[in-house]
Image (cartoon, rainbow, N blue to C red):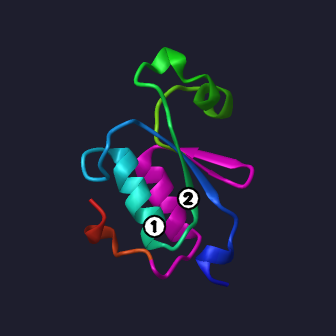
């Protein structure tokens, strides 16, 4: 089954305008490279205003990726989860900074 036919992934991320400066961008690049349809939700800069992220994970730190009913936080854990799911289109570990 192609990744594009899988459920869309919701990515809660910071407001940084590029995918090269932070862990949120790293996750966005990995999801795109694996062929996922991604719905990005930019969260407020202030952690105290991230109520939706807090409700999902019990913390206010992003990135958070939601696969169906499963929410995963931390960019490294999300990228490892993608590898675990067996997405052969994900770049090798050394290629995702």
Residue 7 is covered by the magenta coloring = no
Residue on which disc 1 sits: 32
Is residue 47 positioned above or below 32 on the image?
A: above
Q: Nearer the viewer, residue 63 or 78?
A: 63
Category of crowding for the residue at label 2, using alpha-carbon neighbours closer than 10 angstroms: few (below 14), some (14–19), many (at least 20): some
- Helix, strand or loop at label 1? It is helix
Q: Are marks 1 and 2 in contact (CB under 8 Å)?
A: yes
| The N terminus, quarter of image | bottom right
Return the residue found at the far front.
17
Q: How many marks?
A: 2
Q: Is residue 26 left or right of residue 43?
A: left
Is residue 89 positioned above or below 23 on the image?
A: below
- Helix, strand or loop at label 2? It is strand
Gap between marks 1 and 2 measured at Cα: 8 Å
| The C terminus, quarter of image | bottom left
Residue 34 image point, x, y percent: 48, 73
Which comes sooner in the sequence, label 1 or label 2?
1
Category of crowding for the residue at label 1, using alpha-carbon neighbours closer than 10 angstroms: few (below 14), some (14–19), many (at least 20): some
Q: Is residue 86 left or right of residue 19?
A: right
Return the residue found at the far right.
69
Q: Nearer the viewer, residue 39 or 63?
A: 39
What residue lies at 35% left-to-right and 51% top-to-bottom?
25
Residue 87 is covered by the magenta coloring = yes
Residue on which disc 2 sits: 38
What residue lies at 43% left-to-right and 74% top-to-bottom?
90
What residue lies at 58% left-to-right and 65% top-to-bottom?
37
Quarter occupied by residue 41: top right
What residue lies at 45% left-to-right and 59% top-to-bottom?
79
**Residue interval drawn in magenta:** 65-89
Residue 17 image point, x, y percent: 32, 43
């Amino acid at each position: 089954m192609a990744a594009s036919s899988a459920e869309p992934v919701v990515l809660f991320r910071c407001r940084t305008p590029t995918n090269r400066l932070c862990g949120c961008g790293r996750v966005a690049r990995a999801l795109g490279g694996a062929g996922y349809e991604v719905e990005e939700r930019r969260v407020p800069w202030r952690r105290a205003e991230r109520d939706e992220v807090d409700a999902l994970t019990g913390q206010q730190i992003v990135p958070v990726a939601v696969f169906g009913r499963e929410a995963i936080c931390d960019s490294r854990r999300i990228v490892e989860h993608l590898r675990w799911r067996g997405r052969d289109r994900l770049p090798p570990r050394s290629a995702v900074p």
